[in-house]
Amino acid sequence: MSEKQIRVAVVAIDLFEAASAFLGAVGLVVGFMNIPVSILTTTPFTDFTVPAVLLGFVVGGSALVAAIIAALAIRPFDALSSAAAGCITVGWLTSEIGMIGLGSWAQVVWWLVGLVMIILAVLLWLAEPHAARVSRSHQPV
């Protein structure tokens, strides 16, 4: 795949994650996701307000910022920001599953989305011109 194709994939997956996180945050606050508050009994939260804010601003915000940076091709922060957003997504889902358990196929799907974000970020990093310069600079003279 070319750098441009990888970049398009990075921006697309980052935007998908951002939109999903924002929608999930709204769903938690408004209640259209029909998740009972009783699921939070094993967590430090009494309602979905704090998890929704974290989901929207931290998970969704990091993915949106990563998508913008990747779309603008701000090197080397494009790949780095997408990898960081992917790590935040994986961390969020890992923490969620650890606190409330694996209760939905959606948890696995979005955990995998985070993993794909990381993989695509690495591919973008390797496809960018700086990767070739770095590998050549470590060659014996």
Image (cartoon, rainbow, N blue to C red):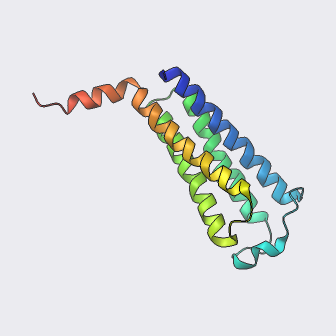
- Residue 48 is situated, as x and y percent measured from the top left of the image, at 79, 65
What residue do we see at 55% from left, 31% from top? 70
Q: Between residues 68 and 41, which one lies in front from this camera angle?
A: 41
- Residue 76 is situated, as x and y percent measured from the top left of the image, at 43, 33
Residue 46, picture quadrant? bottom right
- Residue 10 is situated, as x and y percent measured from the top left of the image, at 57, 33
Instruction: Count the numbered circles shown.
Output: 0
Please state, as top left, top right, bottom left or bottom right, where the C terminus lies in the image: top left
Residue 130's place in the image compared with 20, above or below, is above
Q: Is residue 109 left or right of residue 124?
A: right
Q: Is residue 5 left or right of residue 31?
A: left
What residue do we see at 82% from left, 59% from top? 28
What residue do we see at 54% from left, 27% from top? 7
Residue 124's place in the image compared with 111, above or below, is above
- In the current view of this chain or complex, which residue is farthest to the bottom? 41
- In the current view of this chain or complex, which residue is farthest to the left? 141
Is residue 61 among the parts visible in the rendering?
yes
Q: Is residue 130 left or right of residue 22?
A: left
Is residue 72 among the parts visible in the rendering?
no
- Residue 119 is situated, as x and y percent measured from the top left of the image, at 50, 41
Q: Is residue 37 left or right of residue 130?
A: right
What residue do we see at 50% from left, 34% from top? 78
